[in-house]
Amino acid sequence: MSGLTPSQTVGPYFRLGLDWPDAWRLATATTPGVPLTLVGRVLDGDGLPVSDALLELWQADAAGHYPSPGAQGFSGLGRCGVDATGAFRFLTVKPGAVATPDGGLQAPHLNLVVMARGLLTHLYTRVYFPGDEAAQDADPVLACVPPARRATLLARPDGDVHRFDIHLQGEHETVFFAL
Amino acid sequence: MQRVFAPLPDGVYPANDTPAYRSSARRAPREPAVLAPHTASETLGPRPGAERLVAGLGDLTRPAGARGEALGQRLLVHGRVTDERGRPERRALVEVWQANAAGRYLHDGDRHDAPLDPNFTGRGAVLTDDDGRYEFLTIEPGVYPWGNHHNAWRPRHIHFSLFGAAWATRLVTQMYFPGDPTLPFDPIFMGIADVAARERLVSHFDLERTQPDYALAFRFDIVLRGALDTPWEAPA
C-alpha cells in the first residue's frame, strides 16, 4: 500500500503555469567549467515536431557534484518549453563525472525529463557526450541499455553546439529509463 | 543492480500507450523503459524555491495587476505533500495552473468559444511548509470541450507540478473534483488502471476549512515516491 499519487499529462497549456523564461540558461560567464550549448528537437513517431513539449534538465557541476538544496550559484536545474518546430536550447557547462554508489564513476551526462501533451507520465532520459567513450564503457546505467540503442543517448557536435534530438517513437526512438 | 526507490506498483502511473487518449498514438514510446541502477543522478534532485514564487501567486483570485476579482466560486485548495512513507516534503515547490470559471485557459492555443476573465490568469505557485502543507485560493475551473473524440469534455481540474526530494520523485498531475459527472468519460483520468489510485486524484470537500461567507474548501493530499532506508538489489 503505497498511496502514491498518479501522474497525469502536462497537457497543451503548461506554459501558462510552468513557464520560467530564464531557465534555459543554467550557466553564466563566471560558472566554472567548459561552456556547453545543447540544442535539439522533440519529434513524434512520424518524425514531425512536437510543438508542445516541456523539457527539464538536471545535472552535476563541472566537478561532478550535484548542487545542494539552497546553494548559491549553479543550480543544476534547467527548464525549456520547445518552440513551434519542437526545438529547445540549454546553455550550461559540461558536467563532470558523477560517483556511483560502489565507488566508481559514471560518464558525464545530463538528466532530462520530457513532458508533453499525449504523455500521461513524463519520460526520463540521459544525454552523454562524444569523447567520453572510455568512461561510457564503464558507466553502470549505459550498461543496462542494449548496445544497438546506446547511440540514441549520445549528443553530437554541430559547430559550436551539441545536438540531441529526442525521438518519442519510431526507428530512432530515444532510450527512456524506468526510474 | 542497486535500487533506492521501491518499484512503482502496476497501474498507478498511467501507461503512456493509452489509445483512448488520441494524442498518445504518435508520442508514446514503443520500446519498454530501461531499468538501471539508481545513482546520485536519480536520488538527488533540484530544489527550486522562493526564487520561483512571484508575489501573490498563492491567491489566484486577485492576480497582480488585475483591477478586480476573478469570477467564479471561490475555493481554498489545500493539502499535505508527503512521500510514500509518510515523511513531509518540506519547502517543496508546488506549481498550479487551470482554466477559468467558464472553462477557458489564458493561452493562445485554447480556441474554446468561452469568455476570458480579465481578472484571472490561472497561474499559481506556493511552497509547502515544514509539515509539507500547502494552500492557495482560487476559483472553481469550468469543464471544457476538447477534440479527443466526438463530444469530449475535460472534467474540472487543476494542474499540479511538484518537485520532491529527488529527480526520481518529480510529479506532474491533475486534481479533480468529487461528483464530477464527466470523470468516467475522460480518457486521461481513466488512463490510470488502478481504481483506488485514480480516486486519489479526486479532492475532498472540506467543510472544516470552508471559510464562512467567503470560500468553499477542498483538500488534495499528494504522495510522492520516497527513498528506502536501505538500497536493495533488483535483478539485472
Image: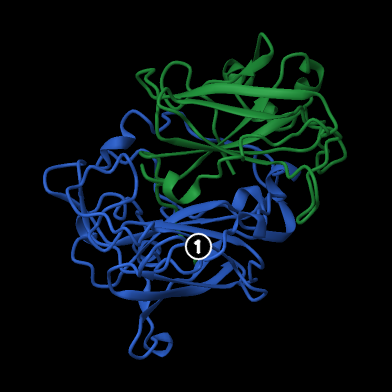
Relative placement, left or right, of B179 versus A76 is left
Residue for point 39% across, 17% down:
A47
Amino acid on which disc 1 is placed = Leu
Name the element at disc 1: loop
Q: Which chain is blue?
A: B
Q: Is residue B11 above or below residue B133?
A: above
Residue named by callout 1: A4
Percent from the top left, x then y, of residue B175? 38, 63
- The answer to whether residue A2 is visible is no
Classify 10 Å Cα crowding around label 1: few (below 14), some (14-19), many (20 and above). Answer: many
* Quarter assignment of residue B93: bottom right
Q: Nearer the viewer, residue B122 or B209?
A: B122
Task: Tell which residue pokes out farthest to the left in this image.
Answer: B150
Report in which chain the residue with disc 1 lies: A
Q: Colour of chain A?
A: green
Task: Tell which residue pokes out farthest to the top in this image.
Answer: A159
Percent from the top left, x then y, of residue A175? 55, 27
Placement of the C terminus of chain A among the 4 image quadrants: top right
* Quarter assignment of residue A140: top right
Residue for point 30% across, 63% down:
B141
